[in-house]
Amino acid sequence: MRSYTLHRQQQIPADINTVWDFFATADNLQLITPQDMNFRILAGADGPIRKGQIIKYKVAPLFNMPLSWTTEITKVEYLSCFVDEQLHGPYKLWRHRHDFRPNALGVLMTDTVTYVMPFGILGSLAHATLVKRRLHNIFDYRYRQIEKIFSAKKQVP
């Protein structure tokens, strides 16, 4: 079983409370997900994230085919990190860790996604030809959206 890792960092020009509040609100995921994925939260996005929270989605990551996806928030360290893990969805394993580190420029956010494709060699082939590129495109989109959102939130002295 081969696992893959996607690692991204982004410097966000805002204070830790503002950044945390944005990412700890599950509904904001819709703002940073490409529209062509037809992403919808079906249940569980009530209130700020908390350990044990179950969130159900509909998403169409490839070929506009809708999939059900259920994740659980398995770890929350307030103003520091949280982890969501797939309970049901397209991957054999999906673990997404979000880390937030305040610094002189605002907050350095780090995303680390560890995932395993289903279907053995067919999954590896799908990863090489489609999935890896699609995931990178999704996180590129997220990066651009976060830049827009937080540049709009900047306070002018």
Image (spheres, grey):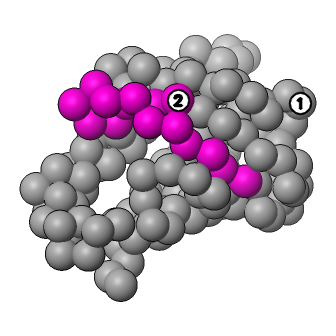
Residue 42 seen from this side: yes
Q: What residue is drawn where x is 67% and y is 25%?
A: 42
Return the disc, 1 or 2, that comes first in the chain's sequence.
1
Give how far across and how far down residue 89 sits, in percent.
50, 50
Quarter location, residue 43: top right
* Residue type of the residue flagged with mark 2: Lys
Residue 96 location in percent, x, y? 57, 59
**In screen coordinates, is 2 left or right of 9?**
left
- Residue at the disc numbered 2: 58
Q: Residue 154, located in which quarter of the rendered image?
A: top right
**Start-end of magenta stretch:** 58-72
**In the figure, is residue 64 to the left or right of 49?**
left
Instruction: For mark 1, give the secondary structure.
Output: loop
Q: Is residue 104 above or below residue 43?
A: below
Q: CA distance from mark 1 to mark 2?
A: 19 Å
Instruction: Give 141 or 9, whichever is nearer the viewer.
Output: 141
Q: Which residue is mark 1?
A: 47
Residue 70 percent location from the top left of the image: 63, 45
> Within 10 angstroms of label 2, few (less than 14), some, or many (20 or more) residues?
some
Circle 2 — which element?
A: strand
